[in-house]
Image: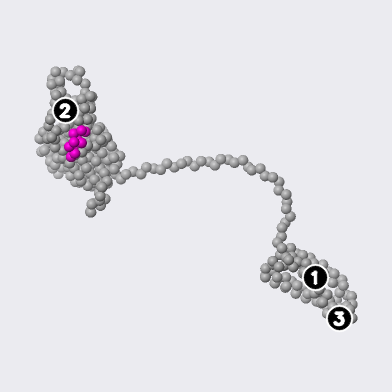
Amino acid sequence: MPLETRIFAIPKDPEHPEQYQDAYGLNAAEGIAVVADGVSSAIFSRQWANILVNAVPADIPNPAEKDFFAAWLAQRRQEWSEQIDTSGLAWFQKAKLPTGAFSTLLWVRVMRSESEEPGSFGALRLHGFAIGDSCLFHVRGGETVRTFPLQNADQFQDNPIVLGSVDLGRDDFLEFNELDEHCYHDDLLILCTDAVAEWALRESEAGNPPNWDEIWHMNDGQWEDQVAQLRETRQMRYDDTTLLLLRVVPKLVEPKLVEPELAEPELAEPKTEPVEEQPEQTSPIEEAVKAMETAAANEAAGEASEAVTEPPAEQSSEEAADDDWAKKFKSAGEQFTEGLEIASGQALRGLKKWKDKAMQKYRDKLKKDRK
């Protein structure tokens, strides 16, 4: 579960940042954050705190599993022993080597719940462990939901239990506090070392809790000025101050890469061969009608010239003309029977109407000529 983060780290003495004994680690994409406060009175505590905060996000431990945690801690102690340089130590520094370094340790992880409980309304799981006095403030809507592991400012007067870089045979007495609660998107999680945690708890108990949203929007210089003022007015102890502000956000969707549109390759124009002109094709119906019209026109012209001749004696002239016209018309129609057989009913009706009109026109002309 990803986290948005703001980090402020100010050494006790700004002119000597190399003496900064606090440390922090993050894996914001996995929702893991950790802080540690090295004990300055011990030796090489800065190295020890850094080893711890680097190891937690990479291989998150579980102190509830004794054997697993013992192996994890032994590996960290081996790393510390290999990193420190004892060649230039003064006699009083060498006297501290047998007991090693010490540090507090607090880590949390935000993750999806394995099973959604009734009434949880899509809550996430906030899980973590702490030893010592580094603290978590869980804030929702400007109100503090919980503090962990300490709940009041007076608890900072006691010497905290810390984690040592040397096995002194007392690991069985290590007591980690465990946190396992719900959190939601947009909650603020504030992890801080003891100087900031004690100030924040005292302000809250006095009815003036810190405005964490306002601090979120500060730049480094503004926060440094505020810390300097709080130290001068003795509201905050002179000590290293480390502050991690984390905001729980929904998992971000990786944008899809859009493939650039490729221009289509220019294709050479296809070579074309000259096309021979083809005679216009007509349907059988069109051919039949055209031939009928031609034949009828020719017949009509011939009949017009022959209409003045006398018909045979046995028939009247009008009956002979009708009979002759019908024979000639039938002869012309028979030449195109094959074409007419595929014509539609509508085309045939049209031809019949044309025939009737032609016959009537011929009769009218014949009558006119006889007058």
Question: How far apart are labels 3 and 2 at the CA level?
Answer: 148 Å
In this view, the residue in front, 141 or 214, is 141
**First along the sequence among labels 3 and 2:** 2
Answer above or below: position of 27 versus 367: above
Residue found 32% across the figure and 44% down from its top:
251
Image location of residue 102, percent across then percent down: 16, 29
Question: What's the mark number on residue 331?
Answer: 1
Residue found 24% across the figure and 37% down from its top:
60
Query: Which stretch did the figure color magenta?
Result: 63-72
**First along the sequence among labels 1 and 2:** 2
Question: How far apart are labels 3 and 1 at the CA level?
Answer: 21 Å
Q: Which residue is mark 2?
A: 166
In this view, the residue in front, 170 or 217, is 170
Look at the numbered discs 3 and 2 and tell me whether their residues touch, using CB distance below 8 Å: no
- Answer with the quarter of the image where residue 359 lies: bottom right
Image location of residue 346, percent across then percent down: 67, 70
Question: How far apart are labels 1 and 2 at the CA level?
Answer: 129 Å
Q: Amino acid at mark 1?
A: Ser
Q: Which residue is mark 3?
A: 315
Q: Secondary structure at mark 2?
A: loop
- The N terminus is located in which quarter? top left
The colour mode here is one colour
Magenta region's main secondary structure?
helix
Tell me, yes or no, whether the highlighted magenta stretch contains residue 311. Answer: no
In this view, the residue in front, 39 or 338, is 338
Q: Amino acid at mark 2?
A: Val
Residue 337 visible (yes or no):
yes
Residue found 76% across the figure and 66% down from its top:
336
